[in-house]
């Protein structure tokens, strides 16, 4: 008696495998169709039989296989692997005591192998330079920038003559005589417009 995983199938009355192919068709302008691609459809297996004993418990186990997509290898009258239960029906009849008739459809699936990625750790050698002691280093100070010197603006002889003329006018002014200043010594005092202002004579003209 055959098993489907852990479930005992008491009686199998019919096993019908079905194999087919599908084509990709395209219509032409004149109404005819051409096929440019052919693919094989999954093989299906129809099984009929009778279950005896605890039929409900067996039916619940077969439902679990169907819902979880458990792969089944069927080896009775024919041999197919990688089968899934896609349909299961049971029928209680009067002429079957302590049992029920059933029909089941199995469908073959193709499994795709997934390539495994393996990570390889390659040790990397680090190049480290040996540290050698160089002793104490003297810190070199940066030389200070030379101080900027102010250069006296050069005056032309014309500019110097104009300055001396204005100075002689102040020295010969009658206001200096009224103030009792000694004109002959005015060069030592450096009298000019700013000094006259300090002497109280800058305001008079």
Image: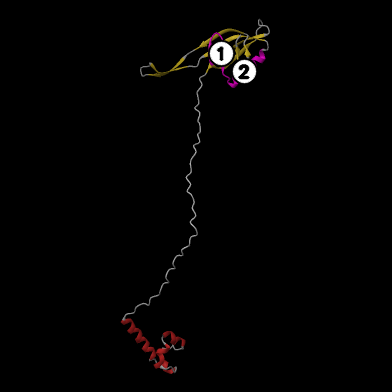
Q: Is residue 141 left or right of residue 96?
A: left
In this picture, is 182 found above or below 113?
below
Indicate which disc residue 63 carries. 2
Q: Where, quadrant-wise, is the N terminus in this rendering?
A: top right
Q: Is residue 121 left or right of residue 1?
A: left
The answer to which quarter of the image holds residue 106 is top right
Q: Nearer the viewer, mark 1 or mark 2?
A: 1
The answer to which quarter of the image holds residue 107 is top right
Label 1 SS: strand
Residue 90, image x and y in percent? 62, 12
| Residue 28 is inside the magenta segment | no
- Taking the image as drawn, is residue 202 in sight? no
Label 2 SS: helix
Residue 72, image x and y in percent? 57, 16
Q: Residue at x 63, y 14 (%)?
A: 7
In front of the other: 2 or 146: 146
Instruction: Classify mark 2: residues with Cα within 10 Å, few (<14), some (14-19) or many (20+).
Output: some
Q: What are the residue bounds of the magenta stretch?
A: 55-81
Residue bearing mark 1: 74
Q: Is residue 66 left or right of residue 111?
A: right
Contact flag, marks 1 and 2 (Cβ < 8 Å)? no
- Taking the image as drawn, is residue 74 in sight? yes
Q: Which sits earlier in the primary sequence, circle 1 or circle 2? A: 2
């Amino acid at each position: 008696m055959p098993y489907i995983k852990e479930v005992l199938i008491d009686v199998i009355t019919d096993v019908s495998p079905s194999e087919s192919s599908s084509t990709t068709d395209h219509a032409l302008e004149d109404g005819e169709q051409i096929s440019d691609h052919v693919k094989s459809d999954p093989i299906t297996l129809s099984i009929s039989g009778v279950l005896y004993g605890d039929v409900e418990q067996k039916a619940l186990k077969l439902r679990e296989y169907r819902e979880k997509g458990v792969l089944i290898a069927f080896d009775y009258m024919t041999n197919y692997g990688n089968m899934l239960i896609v349909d299961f029906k049971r029928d209680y009849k009067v002429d079957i005591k302590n049992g029920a008739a059933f029909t089941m459809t199995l469908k073959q699936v193709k499994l795709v192998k997934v390539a495994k990625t393996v990570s390889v750790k390659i040790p990397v050698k680090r190049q480290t330079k040996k540290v050698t002691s160089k002793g104490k280093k003297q810190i070199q100070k940066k030389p200070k920038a030379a101080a900027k010197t102010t250069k006296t603006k050069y005056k032309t002889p014309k500019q110097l003559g104009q300055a001396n003329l204005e100075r002689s006018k102040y020295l010969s002014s009658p206001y200096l005589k009224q103030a009792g200043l000694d004109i002959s010594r005015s060069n030592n005092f450096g009298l000019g417009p700013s000094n006259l202002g300090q002497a109280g004579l800058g305001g008079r003209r």
